[in-house]
Image (cartoon, rainbow, N blue to C red):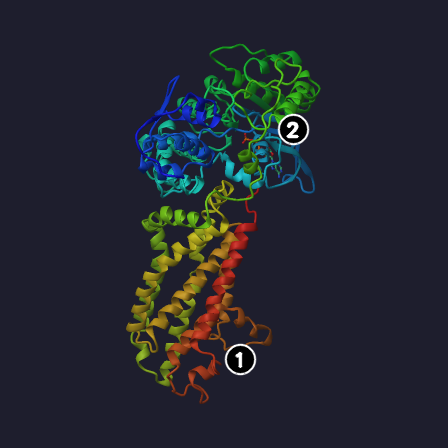
Amino acid sequence: MKKQGGPRAPLEPTWSGTPLISDAMQLVPALKRSSTSVAVTIPEDAASDVQAFPTALEPVVTKLLERTAGSIGSQDVADLGVKAAHMRGGMNIVFKDISCLVRNSAKRGEKLYLLRDVSGCVMAGEMTALMGPSGSGKTTLLDVLAGRKTEGHLSGQVLVANRRPTQMFMRRHCAYVEQFDTLIDNLTVQEMLLYTAELKMKATVPLELKLRRVDALVQQLALDICRHVRIGDAMKRGISGGQAKRTNIGVALISAPRILFLDEPTSGLDSYTSLEVMQHVAALTAPADAGGGVHSGGMTICATIHSPTSATFGLFGRVIILLRGQMVFFGENGTHAARYFAKHFPDLPTFQNSASINRAEWLVTVTTKADRDGRADEFASTYTSSELCRTNSLLLLGAASAAAASRGGIGRFRAPGTAEAPASGQEQLTQEDASELATRNETTTSFWWGYKTLIKYRLVTTLLDTRFVVSRTADKLLNSLIQVTLYWGVGASLRADNLTNIIALVYMWAVFPGLVTITYMPAILGERRLFIRERSDGHYRAITYLCAKLTMELLLAVPFSVVSAALVFYLTRMSGSFAFFWVAYLTTIYVGIALGFFIAAFSPSMDLASVIVSSLVSCLCYSTGNLIRVADMPPYWRWFPNINFLYYAWAALMKNEFEECTTVFVNGHTVLEFYGFVGGVTKWHYLAIEASFFIVFFVGCYLSMRFIQHQRR
Ligand SMILES: Nc1ncnc2c1ncn2[C@@H]1O[C@H](COP(=O)(O)OP(=O)(O)OP(=O)(O)O)[C@@H](O)[C@H]1O
């Protein structure tokens, strides 16, 4: 894009006929429109901001730049960028005959339908409520629509803008606010939002724009009071539950998704805050402007909700009611539902608008009672044979063909033969919509950007976390202290009767990093829910996360391993090279970290991971070749040291210690001969083989994180 400068220049009125330009005009308040001319200024310093525009706006700005000899101020560019986030249209979701069959965990050998032949739609520019008694299948349906259902056999169709979206589209362009918060406890609210903005918005969007987006969300979600407070966790209190819920919603909204799914967004919030939050969410369904013709419809929102207040319930455009996984009502909010139930079930108490019960509560009460009375099937079959269901099936046809939302169509759409026919010439998918729906890219940003962001936001806060630092360093320092005090100066004498003491010290130095492998597992297991959520939200790839986590551990290991190695090497008066003594120790720590991560990544729980790691490590320690020489092992064990990284660590350190030692040890052998370390294999060879285990465990860990589905939902 060319830089342009100079004085303001009028534009001819003809420009306003160009949709792109008119779009920009509606977005940038600073652009002055008049019936005859427009004055736009573009200072030279704004050109870089212009380049960073979201793709959708690039043509607008290019056109503006081409057509104006003036300038747009940096502030205006920022405004345009922030508002652009709201500009993307929502997309209709149509789901047909959705069934979900799972193994019944309550009865062995039986199967259970969590959803049965559920059909409906969620319209763009509208907020749809998923209601029903607890256990009726609301979350299951939400998961199916969001492409996050991992268990059971699914049948039926879910179309977004009349296409089958890729899983990557659902990750990148849809957001899901889960019932339970998954935030990073040692970040502040502002850092959490900014971190998400960095991962979800394009890397080319300047930090200033991202900050403005965070600011806007902080204001809208009333998070100003806690923006610099750490999120905290159950053990270290931070923000309140309601603030955490709002932060979670902010995280979902930061990148202005096309579709927003919310699972019980108001649980844990007081009625005032619930309404405030839901009003903000509902505002996202509004069209970006009131004019017609431009693709800028509101967001598509679907939320499960239990017992909303009257005001909160009034924000929903449509309501879906489920009973035992079957649809018993799908229609517009308002008086429709009450009329429907009164017409088909005259025995039900009629709804009386009163202070004691609102419409939402009444709906929940009658359907829950029907469920308890075993009338779920009756309600479902009544709905299936009702006029409403027939009308709805026409609505689905129309909603499917109305590919992406247009502001004109949203909320106004009616099925043919009902109140209002769909507009002729349904909106075609734009190129941007089509390519988004077909995207195969898991994330918006590159590996390097994701890696850099993870390090930037999580390294410093992690290093400032005393609990983390103590858990990573105390064991190493304590081990060094024990070795120093127990083996003080032992290496000074290479007499035959002292050699076993030195060998024991070398052995413990070699295997200790293996013994503490378990301490690294919580870094993966403790964050599993966060990792699954962030990966499902398209924040980063598994490899990015793994590399960032390893980097943090590896960086922390360096200074403490130097201190530990120096204390032990010099105070116990070891022989050989100090540099090698330290490097071999650090390498073993690194391999141990990778092993800990690997076991954690494939284990379903911490309990199982602990059992695996402790059994494996004891096996490794026994077969290192010191407690029993390799030559003395039974043949069926003798192969094991070959795949034991601790054997190579010990071998390398033994070579370092005894290479120069010619003292006769047992049966006329030198120490190295006695343990079988002869021939042309140098200490560096042993070290290189040991280091290669890092790659094996790294790859195993990556594959586990990438492919093992631990979350069952
Ligand atoms: N494998 C399974 N075996 C037996 N029952 C199951 C299985 N998986 C899920 N369920 C049941 O399916 C039902 C649907 O669960 P879901 O979480 O979708 O309900 P919900 O309407 O969202 O409930 P809530 O409002 O309490 O969150 C629940 O009753 C749940 O216990």
What is the x, y in percent for residue 587? 41, 66
Residue type at mark 1: give it.
Ala
Between 460 and 712, the one nearer to me in the picture: 460
Q: Answer yes or no: do the residues labelled 2 and 1 have beta carbons within 8 Å?
A: no
Between 506 and 215, the one nearer to me in the picture: 215
The reply to whether residue 242 is in sight is no
Q: What residue do we see at 50% from left, 35% from top?
A: 176
User: Which quadrant, please, contains the C terminus?
Assistant: top right
How far apart are labels 2 and 1 at the CA level? Answer: 68 Å
* Residue 348 quadrant: top right
Q: What residue do we see at 47% from left, 82% from top?
A: 680
Left-right relation of 242 to 411? left
Residue type at mark 2: give it.
Val
Q: Residues within 10 Å of mark 2 (few under 14, many from 20)?
A: many
Q: Quadrant of ligand 1?
A: top right
Q: Earlier in the sequence, mark 2 or mark 1?
A: 2
Q: Secondary structure at mark 2?
A: strand
Pointer 2 residue: 118
